[in-house]
Image (cartoon, grey):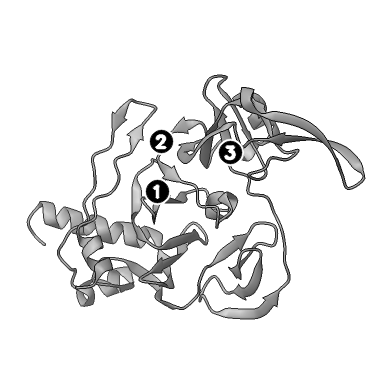
Amino acid sequence: MGKSKVKLLLFVAILIALSSCGKNQEPETIPSSPIDTKLDEEAYGSIDENGFVWRVAPTLAYEGVYYCSEAGEFDTENHSGNKLDPATGQIVSVCQTGHGGYDRNLLYDEKLNQFGFHGNDEGDEYFEMWPWHEFIHENPHYSSRLNVFQKVDSTKVIESRQLLEGSWRTTFDLRDAVSSEKCAIAFGITFLSDFVFELDRSYDVDSVYGHVSSYVAMKYDDMWGILDTNGSISVPFVFDAILLIDEETAFAKYNGKYGILDIEKTAMSLQRLIDGENDGSV
């Protein structure tokens, strides 16, 4: 039995602290019994022995898959590389020129109860903190979607003026202000977890969840999984990498290769296994 299979069978999903009600979610266990793939393929599609439902099997040998929100496309390099078809995972054009965008993860100042965002690790003119109602007035789309927050201490931000592209701009150094690299997820500002998830700088935060509102892909204990708007684990944290495509699918790297995962059907398939194991039918 392979190392990754053993890890999957022994996997216990992380304990998520629900800040809004002060309770903890019970750990979820991935059942150890393999499913009957022939019996369930008609209902679920292409399903493997672990209960994962694939639109495209994990056979794509890419080092990484990235999304550029500015260009609205998926590539084999971060903001460059070969363009991918999000339905098949195949290369549709080669050698894309670079295109940009900022790593705009959201910030939360717990002491001041203020919210904001910044552009990158070194700080830039985009950093500013507001009370929530002012933040939403300027950025209304964050009010009814999944958000990822880092903690920040606004009093430790170093503000300066720099001559950039021929004009003076206010810049902000955040390196001493950000409390940690750990993140929490929230729906609007209703926090669904503690600050337990890892911020992976190889992916822009906006790439991980910014173009999808129903799910968020996060990294925990060096593995990736998917959570829904309730903070529940839809896809367990057993993947090398996950990048959401839309509200239904995601590029998922498993055993070193990418495939396209059906998120909802995978969640249904795994829940069926859990229910079957609990009632003794599996």
- Residue designated by label 3: 106
Displayed quadrant of residue 267: bottom left
What residue is drawn where x is 50% and y is 72%? Answer: 63
Q: Position of residue 73 (x, y in %)?
A: 63, 66
Q: Is residue 159 above or below residue 275?
A: above
Which amino acid type is marked by label 1? Leu
Mark 1 → mark 2, Cα distance in angstroms: 10 Å
Q: Residue at x 37, y 62 (%)?
A: 239
Name the residue carrying label 2. Answer: 192
| Circle 1 residues within 10 Å: few <14, some 14–19, many ≥20 | many
Q: CA distance from mark 3 to mark 1?
A: 18 Å
Label 2, secondary structure: give it. loop
- Quadrant position of the N terminus in the picture: bottom left
At mark 1, the secondary structure is: strand
Q: Which mark is residue 79?
A: none
* Image quarter of residue 108: top right
Q: Is residue 165 left or right of residue 38?
A: right
| Residue 262 as seen in the image, left or right of residue 15 | right
From the top left corner, tell me how far across and down residue 92 is, in percent.
Answer: 62, 80
To which residue does mark 1 refer?
Answer: 227
